């Protein structure tokens, strides 16, 4: 990483004669855009174009069969009076606000447990990572539903301890904890990233702190947390953004309708239902753009506040 | 952390009988190690329980899943659930769903490898005006909720008559649609020494030659990570097929599973879970074979699972 600027500068100086250099530059520009073509095409045709047209659609009434009708801000205004929409916002926010910190706390705690030169570390790392690979799949959603169903293993296990909740799946108060447990179960991906970050912290820091008589708590807050803060920031940002977009698990667990009593009506699920079952595509586009704006604002807030708690060491960018 | 700095270190590899002050710290170390393994093992059991329960249930008769019998082991171990699951649903055999999933996943891998590597080469190795602007935009798409594009994309493909084909599901892969992979390859290529291009250029090689005969062979680890992840992501993808595919004989496994759930309505739990196991099997096999690559890929590139 640190050597690339000098190397590219050297490459820049390699052409000695000016005309040759500029000819090279023209050839490079042509080659650059030729190589970039696949991405560029996709970016324009599948991202930028659709983004603009969904912005337009969000100001219209459109059902796929008749031409879109311009209605101004009506969709956005209706959204805030739509009880199901407000419910979906509530459901998604509580999932993001409780699920993401819990997942990251679990990831960090386990990463710190595993961050030692002990035998079996590789095995544990792989075992804990595995759920992240399959957790968002339809299969696991089906299994989760069965496990948390009436007299499923979770219910049985808890009643062994005298806790009688019954089935979680049919109980509107318990579906959110169940969904949060599903995301916490996938703590492995951020854990592996934390672990890589922890390995970068020089051991001498801890040794010096020990000599000064610092206990584990002081060491955590004065060494681990600040040294790891760029990785914490990265995980927090990515996990938060992804949490907003949960779809397949919610769809399967609720049989595609966000039930019971709308308790699993996640934002993207409601967007899907509006757009592709009611064919209210203008309305769904307004929802999509609102999501982009909210995620954008959250990203911005994260980056703004990061200056006060994220520490980049001198040589990193 | 409490380990005392022993004044005389035994030579590395020497297994001399430890003398007293040392052995004390060895017992402390042993105890710590035991605690570590106990905690890690308990955690492993908790984390892997759902997977174990799933596999165990797939081999049990319906009457024993849930209910009073909570043990993972069944005396009535049988393959019946798998037999039912393999029959398929809606007149389409499960083998067909497997084939469909495989076609989509292989298509995704081929498309991603071709398009992402070429685009990444432009970002990492060629200087051209607008490069950093486009690179910034590419990074921005990593954070963009893709739901903002699905409605217009659907409208486009619908007007082109491509709904209920695999085109909408694959075209994005051939156009470097997964920015993650482009980013991964850019990072990888940036760490390859620039002298390689230099030397090749002096020998008169153009970008095509440099890319195909120098970069691609060196990029093998990045290409392998990309293949693994794009395969698994495509294999597990649900929303894409849900939007675009209407006829069951084109369904990949996740969609077939949904159909299965809808039609059996939990009357045949065993078969449902057996089919879930079958659907995850390739992912699990991939994981067992490539776990090194997968976990390393995540830790160095911050890839999501």
Image (tube, helix red, strand yellow):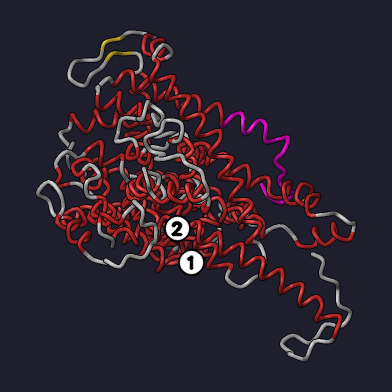
Task: Determine which residue is flagged by label 1.
Answer: B292
Q: Residue furthest left?
A: B91
Residue A6, x across and y down, in percent:
65, 54
Residue found at x 71% / y 87%: B13
| Span of residues in magenta | A299-317
Chain identity of mark 2:
B
Q: Does any portion of residue B282 appear in the rendered image?
A: yes
Q: Answer whether residue A312 is magenta in the image.
A: yes
Q: Earlier in the sequence, mark 2 or mark 1?
A: 2
Marking on residue A100: none
Q: Secondary structure at mark 2?
A: helix
Chain to which mark 1 belongs = B
A146 displayed left or right of B303: left
Between B142 and B240, the residue placed more toward the observer is B240
Could you tell me residue A93's position as x and y percent? 51, 29
Marker disc for residue B49? 2
Secondary structure, mark 1, is: helix
Name the residue: 41% across, 29% down.
A263
Task: Measure how far apart labels 2 and 1 are at the Cα level.
Answer: 22 Å
Q: Report the number of discs.
A: 2
């Amino acid at each position: 990483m640190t050597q690339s600027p000098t190397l590219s500068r050297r490459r820049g100086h390699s052409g000695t004669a000016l005309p040759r250099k500029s000819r090279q530059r023209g050839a490079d520009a042509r080659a650059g855009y030729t190589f970039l073509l696949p991405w560029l095409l996709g970016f324009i045709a599948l991202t930028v174009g659709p983004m603009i047209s969904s912005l337009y659609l969000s100001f219209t009434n459109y059902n796929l069969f008749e031409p879109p009708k311009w209605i101004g801000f009506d969709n956005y205004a209706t959204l805030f009076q739509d009880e199901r929409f407000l419910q979906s916002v509530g459901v998604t926010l509580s999932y993001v606000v409780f699920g993401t910190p819990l997942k990251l706390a679990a990831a960090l705690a386990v990463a710190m447990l595993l961050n030692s030169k002990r035998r079996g570390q590789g095995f544990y790392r792989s075992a804990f990572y595995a759920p992240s690979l399959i957790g968002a799949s339809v299969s696991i959603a089906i299994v989760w539903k069965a496990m948390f169903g009436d007299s499923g293993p979770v219910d049985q296990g808890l009643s062994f301890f005298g806790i009688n909740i019954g089935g979680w799946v049919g109980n509107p108060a318990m579906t959110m904890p169940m969904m949060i447990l599903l995301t916490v179960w996938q703590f492995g991906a951020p854990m592996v990233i934390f672990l890589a970050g922890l390995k970068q912290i020089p051991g001498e820091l801890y040794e010096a702190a020990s000599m000064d008589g610092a206990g584990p708590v002081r060491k955590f807050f004065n060494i681990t947390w600040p040294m790891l803060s760029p990785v914490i920031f990265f995980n927090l940002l990515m996990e938060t953004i992804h949490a907003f977009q949960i779809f397949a698990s919610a769809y399967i667990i609720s049989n595609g309708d966000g039930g019971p009593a709308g308790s699993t009506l996640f934002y993207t699920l409601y967007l899907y239902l509006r757009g592709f079952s009611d064919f209210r595509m203008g309305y769904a586009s307004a929802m999509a753009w609102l999501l982009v704006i909210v995620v954008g604002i959250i990203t911005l807030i994260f980056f703004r506040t990061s200056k006060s708690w994220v520490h980049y060491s001198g040589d990193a960018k | 952390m409490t380990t005392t700095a022993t004044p005389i270190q035994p030579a590395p590899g020497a297994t001399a009988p430890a003398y007293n002050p040392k052995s004390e710290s060895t017992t402390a170390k042993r105890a710590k190690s035991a605690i570590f393994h106990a905690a890690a093992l308990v955690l492993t059991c908790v984390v892997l329980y759902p997977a174990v329960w799933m596999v165990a249930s797939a081999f049990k008769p319906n009457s024993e899943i849930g209910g009073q019998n909570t043990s993972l082991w069944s005396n009535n171990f049988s393959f019946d659930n798998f037999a039912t699951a393999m029959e398929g649903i809606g007149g389409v055999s499960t083998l067909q769903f497997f084939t469909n999933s495989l076609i989509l996943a292989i298509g995704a891998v081929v498309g991603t490898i071709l398009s992402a590597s070429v685009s990444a080469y432009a970002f990492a190795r060629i200087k051209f005006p607008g490069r950093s602007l486009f690179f910034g935009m590419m990074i921005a798409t990593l954070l963009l909720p893709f739901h903002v594009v699905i409605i217009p994309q659907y409208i486009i493909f619908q007007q082109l008559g491509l709904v209920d084909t695999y085109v909408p599901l694959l075209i994005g892969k051939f156009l470097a649609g997964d920015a993650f992979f482009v980013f991964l390859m850019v990072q990888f290529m940036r760490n390859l020494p620039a002298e390689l291009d230099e030397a090749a250029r002096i020998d008169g090689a153009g970008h095509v030659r440099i890319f195909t005969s120098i970069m691609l062979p060196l990029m093998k680890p990045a290409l392998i990570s990309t293949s693994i992840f794009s395969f698994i992501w495509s294999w597990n993808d649900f929303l894409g097929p849900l939007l675009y595919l209407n006829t069951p004989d084109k369904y990949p496994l996740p969609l077939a599973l949904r159909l299965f759930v809808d039609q059996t309505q939990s009357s045949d739990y065993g078969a449902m879970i057996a089919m879930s196991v079958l659907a995850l099997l390739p992912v699990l096999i991939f994981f067992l074979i490539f776990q090194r690559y997968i976990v390393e890929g995540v830790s160095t590139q911050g890839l999501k699972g």
